[in-house]
Image (cartoon, rainbow, N blue to C red):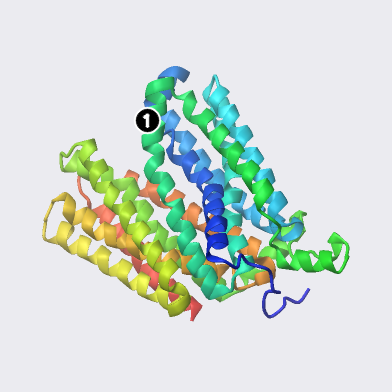
Amino acid sequence: MTAPAASPPATAPQSAAARRRFILLLVAVAAISPLGINIYLPSMPAMARSLGVDYATIQVTLSVYLAAVALGQLVVGPLSDRFGRRPVLLAGMCMYVLGSLVCGLAESIFWLNIGRVIQALGGCSGITLTRTMVRDLYDRNQSASMIGYLTMGMSVAPMVAPVLGGLLEATYGWRSSFFFLVGFAALVTALAGVKLRETNPYLLQRQAADEPRSAYAPAGATAMGLLRGYGKLICSGTFWGYALTTSFASGVFFAFVAGAAYVMIELMGRSPFEYGVYFGSVSLGYIAGNFLSGRYAARVGPDRMIAFGSLCNLVFVLIMVVGFGLLGVHHPLMLFLPMMGVAMSNGLVLPSAIAGAVSVRPDAAGAASGLAGSLQMGFAALVAPLVGWLLVDSAWPLLGVMLVSSILSVITYRLIR
């Protein structure tokens, strides 16, 4: 099947109020997966005691979740190209509710991990399909702006989730965090079922022409169909430019998350509370970058935003390397002020790079969103343990991984050109 040169027209919310309601609902849908990652982190010690395992075993539940999200996105995107965004999204969210319930009722680490896998496979639909739905309704420049606002709203979830989880665990026990996720996800699923309509423009065209669903198969539900959908993307250097730039830019952030606590608490002798206070600045930087993307991406153009953000990312990492590593200014501000700039740079890069990735082949936008998201999460899953393994008595492994990742994000941007 030959791909059209551009997406068929689809109706987007026209008024400012309608756009705000649409984005807020997508934020709620997309936030359920980050909530699942972060809300139970303060409860890990209590979970280990309750289930009779050590802390390292409980930490595996986080790795299992990230791996399942990475793999799930490879399937969710193409399925939405075949069957539509809405049914796949609602099915995924129902899976998330079921997985959260299994976690809350788990009496062993085995069933907790089973629940986490179900949770992740369902929750990844929110991450993948919300940005795909934005691309269905807006052109590339506008979608970069809208994804910026979407990501800005999503970034609030990792900030509030640990606080909420800690309060729930202290008041009702560790299982209450998962029961909260059951209720929250069920409410969002109900709202999405009522308010969200199908946005896949190619599927809507076929339905309007009264053609059978089998007539439209850019990425079928079979294994061969999935491979055909990804085959359109794998041969595109432009897609790899966007996807790899996203992955390497995110890798800088995940490397810092994996190693900053060890450097500050173990090597610098600072308290966990102090680390938490400083880390808040990182989230503020990311929110600021996404706000700037939302405000200016459509006007400046996505490729310029990516280029500027990638260069800023590298500059801020170099400031950290020179100040903390070479000059020996071992103060938390020498870590977190540059990292705030890195987070802001990521807020400039990611919305435009994601919008670019899903625009390379509009008829396979779901597959593109899934593959790009899987690469991003997969690289994060590699970087985080690598930094943890290398860190012993020096911050240089952390600084080195961040520097290499930021350089690679600048190099891979050239593939876009």
Q: Nearer the viewer, residue 400 or 150?
A: 150
Q: Percent position (x, y) of residue 253?
A: 36, 55
252 on left or right of 377? left
Q: Quadrant of residue 408?
A: bottom left
Query: Is residue 226 visible from the viewing direction of this image?
Result: yes
Q: Percent position (x, y) of residue 151?
A: 46, 57
Q: Residue at x 17, y 53 (%)?
A: 333
| Badge 1 density bin: few <14, some 14–19, many ≥20, Cα 10 Å | some
Q: Residue at x 47, y 30 (%)?
A: 177
Q: Percent position (x, y) of residue 355?
A: 53, 68
Does dot 1 land on a helix, a strand or a loop? helix
Q: Nearer the viewer, residue 157 or 23?
A: 23
The residue tagged 1 is 166
266 on left or right of 171? left
Q: Considering only vertical position in the picture, is 309 above or below 276?
A: below
Give the amino acid type for the residue marked by disc 1 in the picture. Gly
Q: Considering only vertical position in the picture, is 291 above or below 99?
A: below
